[in-house]
Amino acid sequence: MDIQPILKALRHQKTAALLIAFEIALACAIICNATFLIVSRLERSQMLSGVAESELLRIRAASLDDDEDKMARIREDIAGLRGIPGVVSVTATQQVPFGQSSWNSGVRTSPDQQNSVVNATTYYDGGEMVSTFGLKLVAGRDFSPDEYYDFDDVASGAVTPSSIIITRTLANRLWPGEPPLNQAIYMGGSDPLRVIGVVETLVRPSIWDDSTAHDCMIFPTRGAPGTQYVLRVQGITPDAVIESATAKLKALQPNRIVRGAETFTQLREEYFRQDRVMAVLLMTVIAALLVVTALGIVGLASFWVQRRQRHIGIRRALGATRGNILRYFQLENFLIVSAGILAGMFAAYGINAWLMQHYELSRLPAYYLPIGALSLWLLGQLSVLHPALRATRVPPAMATRGG
Amino acid sequence: MFRYYAWLAARGLKRNPGLTALMVLAIGIGIGASVTTLTVLQVLSGDPLPGKSDTLFYPQIDPQDSLGYQPGEEPPDVISYLDAKNLLNADRADRQAVMTGGGAAVIPDKPGIDPYLLDLRYTSADFFAMFEVPFLHGSGWTAADDEARARVVVISRRLNDKLFDGGNSMDRNLRLNNQDFRIIGVIDEWRPNPHFYDLNTGNYSDSEEAFVPLETAIQLEMGRNGTMNCFGDERLSPVQALTSGSCMWLQYWVELDSAEKQKDYLNFLTSYSEEQRRLGRFERPVNVRLRSLMQWLDYQKVVPEDVRLQSWIALGFLVVCIVNTVGLMLAKFLRRSNEVAVRRALGAPRASIFSQFLLEAGAVGAAGALLGLALSLLGLAAVRMQPVDYAELAHLNGLMFCAAVLMAVVASLIAGLLPAWQACRVPPALQLKSE
């Protein structure tokens, strides 16, 4: 079909055509960016934790007894929790993945280095953390039982920590391209900490920069303040043992507050709730935007079909088939929408650049543009179908009417 | 004349009820989304202590060693016990308070309530007067109580209702971590938004349920919340860290009632830092700040970025709705070209055609405003159901109500401008000739 007459006719409908193109451009720009935001939020909420989430349960308790032997209490608790049917292993730690509250420290690779290389989080493994969490060792070994020490002994200076397990991300950051085993890192003082093992991945309890989300260290430290228990459950779901675990802790020491238990699925859900809320909100906006844009096109197209009834009648009288008329309006819509999409792509990158500046978003990948374009072409064609079909029903006799 | 235009407008709107409804819907949804998000934004960027906030300041100093020093860095957000003590003793401000968040197990006397964990604030005497905390019974403690590490506590109305059934609980005991504290004050409803004095414990969280002198809390080794950053290679036990000069964990606020005093205080911070440098404690160059309350909130980026982003998205959506309405109105007005041509031929000037159509647009806007307000009430109800700490603050206020009406009418007038202009340019003769 010839484009020439369409362009000519469009010149008489400049305002309306421009309005549709403008609407499409805006929709294109907003939809591309909103989709990109949705995808990045959903991707973020899928962030790897490195632990066997579906099998883990975290339980916290606070003692009301000032005089009890803290270390004996923890040993007794762990033994008690391990006896619960379905529980295969138990560890004590002072922080958990996605648990929000975290201990962090600056890490250096030589004692006299002036600037901290990296800030990493410190997990205190109160025994069997690697196996309970389900961490995957990719180099080296787990802590041996004689390597564990008490937190209070470190604080008093009786013990100097010397071995450490780190994540692969942290290893690559500290010694890019070098094998990390047996390398030394330094925290506050000049005592070296030797890397004895590297785990594939483990996430921080709280993340303020996604690129450092997996920079973690594990120390064989028992009895740190804020000790809590993580249970690995197999054969049944973790929430099935919440009741018995709570009862067990209460029975072992009645004079304490059990602060409830969470599965790791819950911890993750809570941690990324804001991201998911945002994604749902953006999806709603996109849906509303598509509906509003479609209705706008239907309204304008119906109007101009009505205006050109005589014009359509003449063409029909001159031998144009109904199919010709239908394709005329479809092609016209395609041209207008294409112009809008073209402008919209530039606008999309403009908005993206602004978002990058203000909201730490990355560059909009190019493949969002054809997807956006395709959906808008489809939207345009669907919206114009009804008015265009009405146009095909204009009788040739209309040509003989006045006007 | 106006009544005639109004009658014409009503007739015009009635002629295509579908199209009219579509326009009202578009404006309504756009306004609803924008008002919802802007209300949340406005509530969150509010002043927590109107009338008082410009006399409250957050001093910052940099006491760290030279390890990891990078020129141009901001000083830390919290200070050490030693520096807090030094600044308090220097007594250079009208009022001053040091504070941190904490928690303890409360063991109620009241039967039927199990022990539970309570959010606390550890602070010093001036806190209550400086932040204009309203009291239901009693008052805060004195500087002498701080000094004596008195076992006293100020509790919130909520806690008083829960543990003492809302009665006057003055001089009764509150048992925290196996220690008895004498209740010397009950605070009335008090929830400054944002939770400006300590942003570590949630930007919009509720105020704490009980207040205890910081010195007492340190002596009893009560649990604390929030971050602690230590520097230097001295190895400290958690207890030693609390009172050291190298572990920073306390917030420090001062009240300075005049510009003169503010300048003096900034000078004092500089001379204090210089003195500490001479003593060899501070190793970095002098780096001090004295931000006012609102500057501090701004610097701490208190308003969540997502909330700002949501406002932008809603405004973008409103623009799309307006453009859409322009198109629909254009179609609607130009359909009535004949009517316009007849009126023009009968002597109506362009201006009256223009104002008639603009009135019609305004009517659409007014209807859109009503719908938009209804939708934003729904939207805010949805925000209140979200699990965020600012949820219960999301209410429509008078200002946003007016803004919504204004926005809708302006939006629809803008939307009506171009179509009305096109319509009034319909030439009289030509249109009469056709059909």
Image (tube, rainbow, N blue to C red):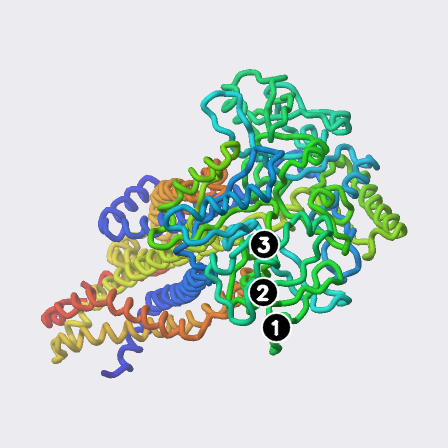
Q: What residue is shown with label 1?
A: A180
Residue B242: image location, x then y, percent: 72, 42
Residue A29: image location, x then y, percent: 42, 66
Residue B414 seen: no
Q: Where A128 sits versus B407, above or below?
A: below
Which quadrant of the structure image shows residue B324?
Answer: bottom left
Q: What residue is shown with label 2?
A: A166
Element at label 1: loop
Q: CA distance from mark 2 to mark 3?
A: 12 Å
Which quadrant of the structure image shows residue A294?
Answer: bottom left
Q: Characterize the local packing of mark 3: few (<14), some (14-19) or many (20 or more) Cα atoms within 10 angstroms.
A: many
Instruction: Report whether mark 2 lies on the same chain as mark 3.
Output: yes
Q: Residue at x 56, y 44 (%)?
A: B202
- Identify the amino acid type marked 1: Pro
Q: Earlier in the sequence, mark 3 or mark 1?
A: 3
Q: Residue at x 25, y 69 (%)?
A: A381
Dot 3: chain letter: A
Q: Mark 3 and mark 2 in contact (Cβ < 8 Å)?
A: no
Report the quarter where the C terminus of chain A lies: bottom left
Dot 1: chain letter: A
Q: Mark 1 and mark 2 in contact (Cβ < 8 Å)?
A: yes
Q: What residue is shown with label 3?
A: A124
Q: Characterize the local packing of mark 2: few (<14), some (14-19) or many (20 or more) Cα atoms within 10 angstroms.
A: many
